């Protein structure tokens, strides 16, 4: 069975949503590149997988009911099949914002899609 690369990213996004809902830090950060850059909806920046892990750990500890859902509207695979663009909306649950829009850059390496960068804007 051949799986479309867009489906691979969509499935990976669903897995990250599940990991966030379950506060499963290990599963969540498995989808990050080591040099990931995340700009949160409040404008704070996380640079590196370690920084993201520490931020998520603190959030999950201090806000036990916090969650986020990312809903992709569009996924585009680059012509060389090594990069992808994802955009959509996000929902915040028991956090500072009820949601907004986001975009993500995915990189394909060793038969896996990982998140290289994410930008969230609280609206």
Image (cartoon, helix red, strand yellow):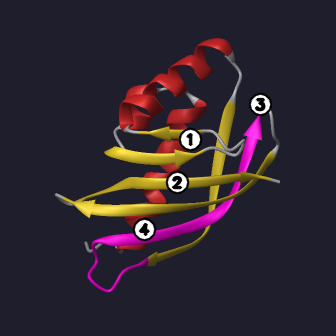
Check the picture and name the quadrant holding the N terminus.
bottom left
* Residue 110 part of the magenta segment: no
Work out whether mark 4 precedes mark 1 in sequence or the reverse, and give the earlier one.
4
Q: Nearer the viewer, mark 3 or mark 4?
A: 3
User: Residue lying furthest left in this view?
Assistant: 110
Q: Residues within 10 Å of mark 1 (few under 14, many from 20)?
A: some
Q: Residue at x 74, y 47 (%)?
A: 91
Residue labelled with disc 4: 7
Residue contact between numbered discs 3 and 1, judged by CB atoms under 8 Å? no
Residue labelled with disc 3: 95
Q: Nearer the viewer, mark 3 or mark 1?
A: 1
Q: Looking at the picture, does residue 36 appear above or below residue 59?
A: below
Check the picture and name the quadrant holding the C terminus.
bottom right
Task: Mark yes or no: residue 33 visible.
Answer: no
Q: On the rendered structure, is 50 left or right of 58? A: left
Q: Residue at x 77, y 30 (%)?
A: 95
Q: Main secondary structure of the magenta part?
A: strand
Q: Check disc 4 and report its element: helix, strand or loop.
A: helix
Q: Check disc 1 and report its element: helix, strand or loop.
A: strand
Q: CA distance from mark 3 to mark 4?
A: 29 Å
Query: x, y (%) of residue 64?
Result: 67, 16
Q: Nearer the viewer, mark 4 or mark 2?
A: 2
Q: Which mark is residue 118?
A: 2
Q: Residues within 10 Å of mark 2 (few under 14, many from 20)?
A: some
Q: Check disc 3 and report its element: helix, strand or loop.
A: loop
Residue labelled with disc 1: 45
Work out whether mark 2 precedes mark 3 in sequence or the reverse, and give the earlier one.
3
Q: CA distance from mark 4 to mark 1?
A: 28 Å
């Amino acid at each position: 069975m051949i799986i479309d690369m867009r489906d691979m990213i969509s499935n990976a996004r669903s897995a990250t949503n599940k990991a966030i809902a379950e506060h499963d830090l290990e599963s969540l950060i498995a989808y990050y590149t080591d040099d990931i850059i995340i700009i949160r909806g409040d404008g704070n920046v996380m640079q590196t997988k370690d920084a993201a892990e520490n931020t998520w750990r603190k959030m999950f500890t201090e806000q036990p009911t916090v969650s986020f859902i990312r809903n992709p509207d569009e996924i585009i695979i680059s012509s060389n099949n090594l990069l992808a663009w994802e955009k959509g909306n996000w929902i915040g649950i028991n956090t500072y914002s009820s949601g907004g829009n986001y975009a993500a850059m995915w990189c394909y390496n060793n038969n896996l899609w990982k998140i290289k960068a994410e930008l969230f804007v609280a609206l």
